[in-house]
Image (cartoon, helix red, strand yellow):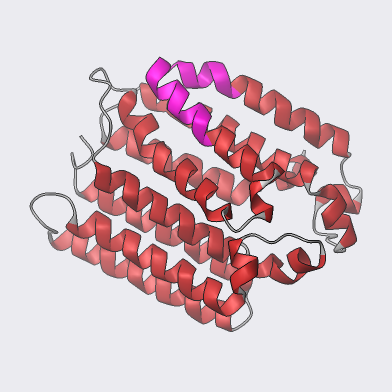
Amino acid sequence: MIPLLRASHFQPTLAVTAITTALAVAVGRGLGSIWVALAVFAGQLSVGWSNDYLDRGRDATAGRTDKPIVSGRISARAVGVGAVAAVVVCVPLSFASGWRAALVHLVAVASAWVYNARLKMLALSVLAYMASFALLPAFVTLGLASHRWPPAWAMVAAALLGAGAHFINTLADIDADAATGVRGLPQRLGPERSLLMGTGLMAAATAVVVFAPAGGPDVLVSVLAVGALIAVVGVVVVARAGHDRAAWSLTLCTAGLAVAVFLANGSALT
């Protein structure tokens, strides 16, 4: 079970699920937030498992013994079956929020699968992250009784966070990716410029969620924003020190703090 969870990229899977569920609670989805959590969790599991399944050859070439398939702790077939099963389960769980929300969420999951299968090789790789993350607030609000889209600034902020996460997430793997022919935008830019792009995008996302909602930031929002910016600086510091995995963990913290600003703004999404 543990190797299967590791193959799912469990840390980001939990982070994305927790963040989206928190947004659902904040906008008043009530018990419907449970369906949001289950749908996002299933979708993220499918994305993580499909990633490790499709990358198993490249991971073996790069000597990625931290990957459960490469190390032999789990079979490729088990991970592939898990990916398919998770995406199948994701469909009815998404439709529990209504057909509008379901279609949006399934497009977000499909975008991530397209990234795993092909887009990660191209200079347009960041677009998959932007699309998938931008649609998560829409999945939350379209499941309300009013079926309304979130404000444009919320989707922009989510897209910026997703783009920033893409650049930071690849830092630890840039050398291995180059050796196996993965040529997404971060790999083309290199580690230094990817670090600057990633942290800059996360800082921009924080600025959007602080200043875009009507009324301007209050004390709590300002404190959370400062915390998010400190986390961004932390990403730079630990990444430059060579701790790319820690930089990714701080990236998830930054995303969580940005969502906390959403929560502090109360009904900003509605």
Q: Would you say 121 lies left or right of 217 here?
A: right
Q: How many marks?
A: 0
Q: Would you say 115 lies left or right of 162 here?
A: right
Residue 89 vertical placement versus 208 (above, below) = above
- Can you tell which quarter of the image residue 91 is in? top right
Q: Nearer the viewer, residue 59 or 36?
A: 59
Q: Nearer the viewer, residue 125 or 36?
A: 125
Give the quadrant of the C terminus.
top left
Residue 197 image position (x, y, % from top left): 47, 70
Residue 207 image position (x, y, % from top left): 26, 63
Residue drawn at x 88%, y 56% is 60
The answer, for residue 252, to whether it is visible in the render is no
Q: Would you say 154 lies left or right of 9 here?
A: left
The answer, for residue 264, to whether it is visible in the render is yes
Residue 122 image position (x, y, % from top left): 64, 55
Q: Is residue 98 part of the magenta span, yes or no?
A: yes
Give the quadrant of the N terminus.
top right
The majority secondary structure of the magenta stretch comes to helix
Residue drawn at x 65%, y 52% is 120
Residue drawn at x 26%, y 17% is 145
Which region of the structure is painted magenta?
90-108
Q: Is residue 126 part of the magenta span, yes or no?
A: no
Give the residue furthest to the right: 72
Give the residue furthest to the left: 215
Residue 253 vertical placement versus 77 (above, below) = below
